[in-house]
Amino acid sequence: MNYNELSIPEATRLQQELRKEVITTPFKGKVQYVAGADISFNKFSTTVYAGIVLLHFPSLQPVGYSLVKKEVTFPYVPGFLAFREVPALLDAWQQLPQKPDVLVVDGHGIAHPRRMGIASHFGVLANQVTIGSAKKKLFGLYEEPGPAKGNHSPLTDKQGEVIGTVYRSKQNVKPIFISPGHLIDVAGSLDLVSQCVQRYRLPEPTRLAHNAVNQFRLGTLPQGYTPA
């Protein structure tokens, strides 16, 4: 499907259809590789830079970088950013010679007004275990977690259903917002992402993906797949 041709009402209906396919059950597999995905773009531009960084787990040593540039005309509308981002990420995904066991996406999973953030959207289309790890809240209610690293509190909808976790990844810094994307639950998402946090606020997979797409945008990393 060409997302560039969708109207917002059509995109809404597609999110509602894809939502029926999201599975949030405990992940029972073994994690040998984890990856991070991120996008860089100017909301007034049609050019999207997408990147997926593959890492060994639990060492979090980078294995390689898959980077793609794509032209996108779907408008910049909060709650619908997946329609700008997912096509380019799918191209980057196809370039990966080794697929990860879990993909951590810079964005939201089910912590979304229609339970269809980018991590859930991508996960359903790729049939892949995905987690959303976002810098800001898009949707939900929570109490501020304690100030120490590792403190966390539930993120809920208005009915009280837990849709994610607000996690203090570093002492006295703003928390991150973790939610299951597809084929994993809230507890498993928190467990995996917490193991991916090192010295920084962001977990290593999305932190390295963020750095990679910005280097790609500046021309210091090439398009395609590059071993680390």
Image: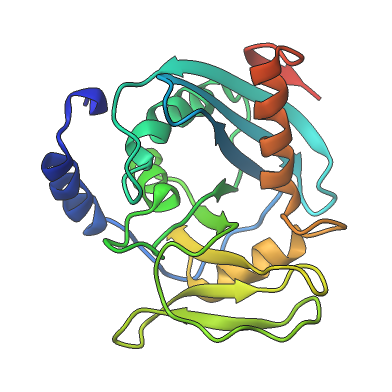
Is residue 34 positioned above or below 175 on the image?
above
Q: Is residue 208 left or right of residue 73?
A: right
- The image quadrant that residue 172 belongs to is bottom right
Q: Is 213 above or below relative to 192?
A: above
Q: Give the total number of marks visible in the rendering.
A: 0
The foreground one among 56 and 161 is 161
In the figure, 210 relative to 185: above or below? above
Q: Which of the image's four quarters has the C terminus?
A: top right
Tell me which residue sits at (58%, 35%) in the image.
99
Evaluate whether residue 32 shows in this view.
yes
**Residue 11, image x and y in percent?**
19, 42
Image coords of residue 136 (percent x, y) = 55, 60
Q: 24 left or right of 69? A: left
Q: Which residue is drawn at 87% across and 57% down?
A: 199
User: Which residue sits at x=81%, y=47%?
Assistant: 60
Location of the N terminus (image quadrant): top left
- Relative to residue 75, is residue 110 drawn left or right? right
Residue 183 seen in this snapshot: no
* Furthest residue toward front: 44
**Pick the front one: 166 or 41:** 41
Q: Name which residue lies at 35% across and 79% down.
A: 157
Nearest the eye: 63 or 132? 132
Relative image position of residue 69 (x, y in whole percent): 52, 16
The image's colouring method is: rainbow
Q: In this view, does 62 lie to the left or right of 206?
A: right
Which of the 4 image quadrants contains residue 28? bottom right
